[in-house]
Image (cartoon, coloured by chain):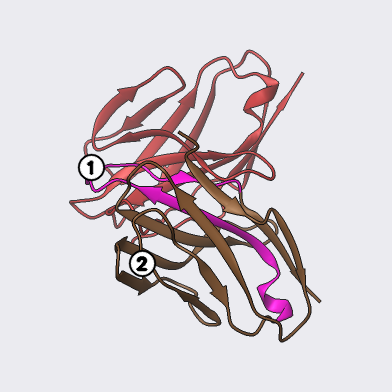
Chain colours: A brown, B red
């Protein structure tokens, strides 16, 4: 199993540009989530999904869109990038069990100029 | 969601036992206490999870008193590779984790 994979590893955008961060998992997990981590801080939940076709907002959803058309993939879209979105983005997945733990991807480091 | 409070940083030396305490006064009945470890430039990694009393695995032990208002992560005989940030979380669902700032553990030679 590859686990949770994310692409790209690094990305530089100009203010106003849009892009999609890709996330895929091969563990057949129902739940997937996106977090962002700013320097020296903990992770903050952006959006999450409890299954294909079902998504919901986390703590900091503004400026981001998600969709979940398949169990495996959970892309995160930045609609119009802003310097405040400069961060490291982590995707995670977990099973449906009440105490199932989250498996995190390696992260995407995004810089918005 | 209930918050957790843990020390910002801790220092230790190789071979010592490290205990990191987390306070969670408003823990809910259905919350499990979960600890994650994060190395620089990597995603967090699950260490241990418990509901009450004591849990031990090959990496760490987790001590939870009867009132569940705090918990202690114990790392036996730490090495330099244990230098990382450790997060204490209350896990009432497996997909909506709320991370605090964590505890930065520095292990010195």
Residue sticking out furthest to the left: B29
The chain letter for the residue carrying disc 1 is: B
Instruction: Determine which quarter of the picture holds residue A103.
Output: top left
Instruction: Determine which quarter of the picture holds residue A7.
Output: bottom right
Element under disc 2: loop
Rate crowding at label 1 as few (under 14), some (14 to 19) or many (20 or more) other CA atoms within 10 Å: few
Residue sticking out furthest to the right: A113
In this view of the protein, which residue sits in the foreground, A58 or B108? A58
Instruction: Determine which quarter of the picture holds residue B64.
Output: top left
For disc 1, the marked residue is B67
Going 75% across and 83% down the picture, which residue do you hit?
A15
Residue A36 percent coordinates (x, y) = 57, 63
Is residue A46 in the magenta section?
no
Quarter in which the N terminus of chain B is drawn: bottom left
Residue A69: assigned label: 2
Span highlighted in magenta in the image: A82-106
**In this view, B44 is above or below B75:** below
């Amino acid at each position: 199993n590859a686990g949770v994979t994310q692409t790209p590893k690094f990305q530089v955008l100009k203010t106003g540009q849009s892009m999609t961060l890709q996330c895929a998992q091969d563990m057949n997990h129902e739940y997937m989530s996106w977090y962002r981590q700013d320097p020296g801080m903990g992770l903050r939940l952006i959006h999450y999904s409890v299954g294909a076709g079902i998504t919901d907002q986390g703590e900091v959803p503004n400026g981001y869109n998600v969709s979940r058309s398949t169990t495996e993939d959970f892309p995160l879209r930045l609609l119009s990038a802003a310097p405040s979105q400069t961060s490291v983005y982590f995707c995670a997945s977990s099973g449906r069990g009440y105490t199932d733990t989250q498996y995190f991807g390696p992260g995407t480091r995004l810089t918005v100029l | 969601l209930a918050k957790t409070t843990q020390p910002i940083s801790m220092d230790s030396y190789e071979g010592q036992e490290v205990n990191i305490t987390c306070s969670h006064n408003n823990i809910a009945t259905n919350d499990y206490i979960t600890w994650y470890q994060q190395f620089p430039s990597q995603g967090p990694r699950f260490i241990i999870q418990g509901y009450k009393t004591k849990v031990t695995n090959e990496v760490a032990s987790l001590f939870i008193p009867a009132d569940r208002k705090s918990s202690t992560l114990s790392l036996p005989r730490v090495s330099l590779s244990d230098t990382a940030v450790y997060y204490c979380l209350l896990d009432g669902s497996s997909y909506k984790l709320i991370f605090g700032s964590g505890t930065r553990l520095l292990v010195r030679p």
